[in-house]
Amino acid sequence: MRYYPATLEQVEENCNPYYIGTLQFSENSNAIVQADTEAEAIAELEFALIGAVEFAFKDEEPFPTPLPPQKGEILVLMPTLVEAKVLIHNERIKHKLSKTELGKLAGFTSAEMQRLLNPWYKSGIDKLDKLFFALGLTLQFSLLGEAK
């Protein structure tokens, strides 16, 4: 799973506390959110992360791997399904394939490819697996940490 570093700061203005979060995607790219509670700010940071993925996909740019977290930063989770789509997208860009070309290799129509590579769309992992196979790759899952 990918976690992207972010800062979260509580600010008070006119006796009204709120939170400002800054999510760092790369050295040159970030998103800033504001929310009333810490939980809302974290949810907004997660939303901003998926939004940034969407923009990278539309711009046909690779989405960067996370920067190493610095002391005091929180980590914002990229959902596993979105991470799988980022891996496919970045490999597609690396191989200089259009969405349509990759779709043909995997047996999908252009419309299906638009949905499959949309970070907001809940694609079936089996369909993404076909895209990995078409790229000559295998998606592997593993668990880290201790069982409780």
Image (cartoon, rainbow, N blue to C red):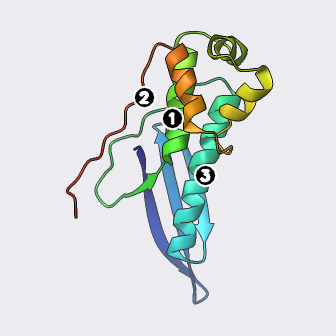
Residue displayed at 63% across by 32% down: 56
**Which one is closest to the eye, mark 1 or mark 3?**
1
Residue under the image location 60 percent in, 30 percent down: 127
User: With 142 as the anchor, is 46 left or right in this view?
Assistant: right
Q: Toward which corner of the image does residue 115 lie, by quadrant?
A: top right
Residue 98 sits above or below residue 75 on the image: above
Q: Measure the C-alpha gap from mark 1 to mark 2.
A: 8 Å
Pointer 3 local density, CA inside 10 Å: few below 14, some 14–19, many at least 20: some
Q: Foreground residue, 138 or 49?
A: 138
Earlier along the polypeptide chain: callout 2 or callout 3? 3
Q: Earlier in the sequence, mark 1 or mark 2?
A: 1
Rendered position, 91 above or below 56:
above
Residue at far bottom of view: 15
Q: Which residue is mark 3?
A: 48
Q: Which residue is mark 1?
A: 84
Report the amino acid beneath label 3: Ala
Instruction: Give the secondary structure at mark 3.
Output: helix
The structure residue drawn at horizontal position 60% and vertical position 46%, both measured from the top left corner, is 50
Tell me, yes or no, if residue 59 can be seen here.
yes
Residue bearing mark 2:
139
CA gap between label 1 and label 3 equals: 18 Å
**Disc 1, disc 2: CB below 8 Å?**
yes
Q: Dot 2: what SS?
A: loop
- Whether residue 63 can be seen here: no
Pick the front one: 128 or 47:
128
Q: Position of residue 131 (x, y in %)?
A: 57, 22
Q: Residues within 10 Å of mark 1 (few under 14, many from 20)?
A: many
Q: Position of residue 63 (x, y in %)?
A: 53, 31
Three-letter code, disc 2: Leu
Q: Position of residue 148 (x, y in %)?
A: 22, 65
As drawn, the label of residue 9 is: none
The quadrant of the image that shows the N terminus is top left
